[in-house]
Image (tube, rainbow, N blue to C red):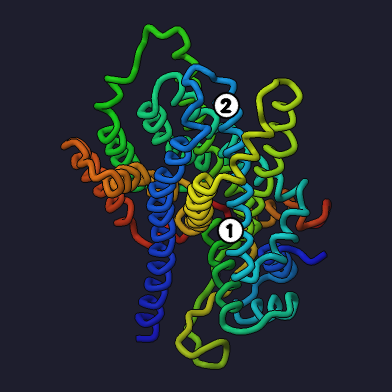
Amino acid sequence: MASAELNAALHRHYLRNQRWGFFWALCTAVLWGAWYIPGTAVWYEEPFISIDQNDHGLRLAATAVMTWIHAIMVLLFLLLWNGMLGKIADFGRTIVRFRRISKWYALASLCGGPMAIFGSYMAMGYVGPVFAAITSLFYPVVGALLARLWYQEKISASAALGMAIIIMGGVVIYGPALFGEADFRDNYAWLGYLGGVMAAVGWGAEGAVAARAMDVSDPDVGIQCRFSFECLFWGLLVLPLIYLLTELPLGSLIWVMITDKMILIWMLLASIAHAYCYTAFYKSFSLIGVGRGEAIGNLHGVFAVLFVMAFTLQLPAWYFLVGLTLTVIGSFVMFREPAESVAELREAET
Amino acid sequence: MKLPHKGFLLQQLSQVPSYWDYQLIPLALTEYQVQGLYWINHFSIALDELAAAGLINRISERIDDGTAIASGRLLFEYSLSRFGRQRMHDTGLLPEGVE
């Protein structure tokens, strides 16, 4: 009787952890989807809307400034979050151990920030936004493979199947539009394809690299370390280099971003969504693993389309419903795994 | 400077064959000068995460009869895994040469 009671309590415990893990991953997907609305809207404000499509230098400089200010705002919201949770001191204790611990968060910020975002921008600019969205959907495969090869994260058959179905769903959502977008005669298209690969590898590697540091540190603290490094990277390296090597108007871009009311509102909304999207993302890794966390996070494609639909009142095409069904089925296939198998994420020796 | 929370939990576990969570968590509460159910649950979650990542093993479990933390609460006994010890070396939580 006592043993039955204990077994039931154990099952409830593992089930609760599994549910929290999937809940955080789902929050990631919802907030990531929501982020596209203010993240896109800011490009429709002056002076960004007036930047010529072919003025690649200015577009890249604007993106760099935008990403830096975005990272600073995200960091402020994370400070608020960790302040409320009482984890600021632990953040200090973690970030100062750079050589052994927080360097992994610095590397994660390079993978997720400059590599993936810059790659995504290249994919958008040289092939098209739909191609960029599709290539980024493959990042859980990269993340799961890296986590598997690097530190033996277990990928069960149902997790792999669920992951494949979710990715297929994403491809169905965006796929048909890709045929109207890809232009294989374009000499610069290879830059876009390279960017697509950079996005998938960058975001996939970010999860695996960050999880390496989260072995010995708190996920809430970890995400604050990651954004601290991203702020430093853009502010102390990339932007000064652009300033020294080009004549692009960085100063006026920064000034307009921090003084224009509408740009500030969009940036604040994007930063809130991104700050807590990333917090949820990192929290899910430590409970359900990088592979599952990233795959459920991939549902952001569905939520992005739903949010766009809500704001523009434009109904999506029929194939969106097919893709939506596939991604939801894929999520349930993953969620059907026994909670006990999710409780031990790695094949570690005792 | 004090260790990050998870580092402290690992370091304590590296010094003994095993610890029950109700023995280990009070050490952390004292180290970081915090108290209350919020922090007890915070360190319990940290132990859950360490176990899921394979750094520590759950070697036994029992239900609290009211003498440990709270009646009916599930309690775990943890030990450091070989992988956990290796990760402690990787992250400087165990000095070079210490096994």
Q: Residues within 10 Å of mark 2 (few under 14, many from 20)?
A: some
Could you say where residue A251 lies in the image, as x and y percent from the top left? 69, 34
The correct choice, above or below, for B69 with respect to A76 in the image is: below
Do the dots labelled 1 and 2 sit on one chain?
Answer: yes
Q: In the image, is A136 to the left or to the right of A301?
A: right
The quarter of the picture where the C terminus of chain A appears is bottom right
> Given the image, on which type of amino acid does mark 1 rest?
Phe
Toward the viewer: A169 or A233?
Answer: A233
Image quadrant where residue B15 sits: bottom right
User: Nearer the N terminus, badge 1 or badge 2?
Assistant: 2
The correct choice, above or below, for A3 with respect to A306 in the image is: below
Name the residue furthest bottom.
B66
Q: Residue at x 69, y 80 (%)?
A: B34
Distance Cα–Cα, label 1 vs label 2: 26 Å
Q: Which residue, given by chain and number where applicable, does mark 2 sit on? A: A60
Q: Residue at x 38, y 62 (%)?
A: A339
Dot 1 falls on which chain?
A
Q: Residue at x 66, y 27 (%)?
A: A249
Could you say where residue B62 lies in the image, as x and y percent from the top left? 49, 81
